[in-house]
Image (cartoon, grey):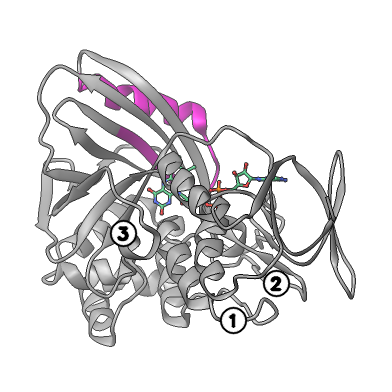
Amino acid sequence: MDKMFDLILIGRGLSNLLFISQYLKAHQNLKILILEKNKKIDERFISTWQGPGLIDLKKEYNIFPIQSFNEISVSEKNNKIKRKIKPYKYQTYQYSEIINILLNQIKARGIKILYSEVSQIKENKKYVSVSTNKEIYKAKYVLNSSPRHETNIDKSEPMLYQYFIGTTIKKNKDHNIKECQLMNFIQADKEIAFNYVIPFNHNSLLVETTAFGRLKNFDNLEKLHQISLTQYKTFKSLSVEKGIIPMSISQSFKRTNRIIPTGISGGFARPSSGYLLLRAATWAKESKNKNLNQIVFKEKIITHFLDKVFIKACYFYPDLAPEIFMKLFNAKCIQSIIRFLADIPSYKDLIHLIKTSPKKIMIYALFK
Ligand SMILES: Cc1cc2nc3c(=O)[nH]c(=O)nc-3n(C[C@H](O)[C@H](O)[C@H](O)COP(=O)(O)OP(=O)(O)OC[C@H]3O[C@@H](n4cnc5c(N)ncnc54)[C@H](O)[C@@H]3O)c2cc1C
């Protein structure tokens, strides 16, 4: 095989495949190689908002949700807020299904995928060399979604880890399938912890226990998760998923001349929520007509600033976090909050968000 390419993608994951499926629409003749270390595709669930003003995943990528909700809930102790979110929807997708659909689209255009782990990337003036344990490939540009092991995070600034354990369970008793439980806060020492529940049908659901913490204490999270599962009494565990996403506003995602970081290592995950799918899909569409030397993935200044205040509030005042979320989800106009979470807030939405949030906590956090 000729080892010189126009573009090499490191990782056959969500962000790279969303990008390339759009990019190929405007750049048909590029010589592209995808290098992926794992042949097996992860089994996990990915959720996102859909609705007016948001990129339509069905239309743009031909991907379909396995579940769609018009109603969400957020609870703390005995206080439960249920909100109808029309015209928006909260939708859940199967990661492996998205990857397979995108892979088929890409393979149909003759793009090669090789299963090999990239061990080294070296950039010089004219090209980038990408080494696996078998070969060295060269490319004019590289999209790199391999994790950078937090080397890009400035740890002197407040940062949290969002880490989670989710179990898909099958149970006998019927469950309300209309409502997705976004957050049900639970007691945790010096951390924010909550359960997130996605029902797939009347007797199978994903129960995820998530913590926002300064450290990643998976042993403790596992205990909280097992306690949370006991409420379902008799059930069968179908699968388990785990993850860690850094919640930091002081990460550097800068591209070099020829290497463009993508995915979590490229700032595609929203710092305050860890959600990536929508942003990755939107940024992919926005960059499809650009040349590879012009592409810069960057979040909006205002959402970055508000995320910073929010992360600081959660970092310094974890006990007060449930109050912040309860107030936000109780907002007069829930659609404004959704547009903010989905990265497309208008100025009116931002004013509504600021009016709704507990100002005292936010102002204290800002000046910490
Ligand atoms: C369990 C879980 C649940 C999540 N839920 C949601 C959700 O509901 N909504 C949401 O928006 N986001 C969610 N996320 C966050 C985010 O959307 C996903 O993690 C998403 O898959 C990240 O996209 P990515 O392209 O950065 O990485 P991935 O999709 O993980 O792709 C990276 C690929 O690169 C490969 N790779 C890495 N290193 C190398 C190397 N050196 N050489 C070759 N290949 C390499 C990996 O094997 C992988 O296939 C979740 C994350 C996890 C872990």
Question: How packed is label 2: few (under 14 Cα within 10 Å), some, or many (20 or more)?
Answer: some
**Is label 1 in contact with label 2 (beta carbons under 8 Å)?**
no
Q: Position of residue 163 (x, y in %)?
A: 47, 42
Camera-side mark, 2 or 3: 3
Which residue type carries mark 2? Arg
Looking at the image, tell me whether mark 2 or mark 3 is earlier in sequence order: 3
- Name the residue that disc number 3 marks: 58
Residue 290, numbered circle: 1
Residue 306, numbered circle: none
- Name the residue that disc number 2 marks: 255
Q: Residue at x 20, y 22 (%)?
A: 231
Q: Position of residue 73 (x, y in %)?
A: 16, 49
Q: Residue at x 45, y 55 (%)?
A: 274
Q: On the rendered structure, is 158 left or right of 71? A: right
Q: On the rendered structure, is 230 left or right of 315? A: left
Numbered disc 3: secondary structure = helix
In the image, the residue with mark 1 has its CB under 8 Å from the nearest atom of ligand 1: no
Q: Residue at x 29, y 23 (%)?
A: 169
Please say if 109 is above or below 239: below
Query: How far apart are labels 2 and 3 at the CA level?
Result: 30 Å
Depth order, front residue of 26/285: 26
Q: Position of residue 301 (x, y in %)?
A: 47, 81
- The stretch of residues the image draws in magenta is 207-232
Depth order, front residue of 147/282: 282
Q: Position of residue 63 (x, y in %)?
A: 35, 53
Q: Where on the picture, by quarter, is residue 291?
A: bottom right
Question: How packed is label 1: few (under 14 Cα within 10 Å), some, or many (20 or more)?
Answer: few
Query: How far apart are labels 3 and 1 at the CA level?
Result: 23 Å
Camera-side mark, 1 or 2: 1
Query: How far apart are labels 1 and 2 at the CA level?
Result: 15 Å
Looking at the image, tell me whether mark 1 or mark 2 is earlier in sequence order: 2
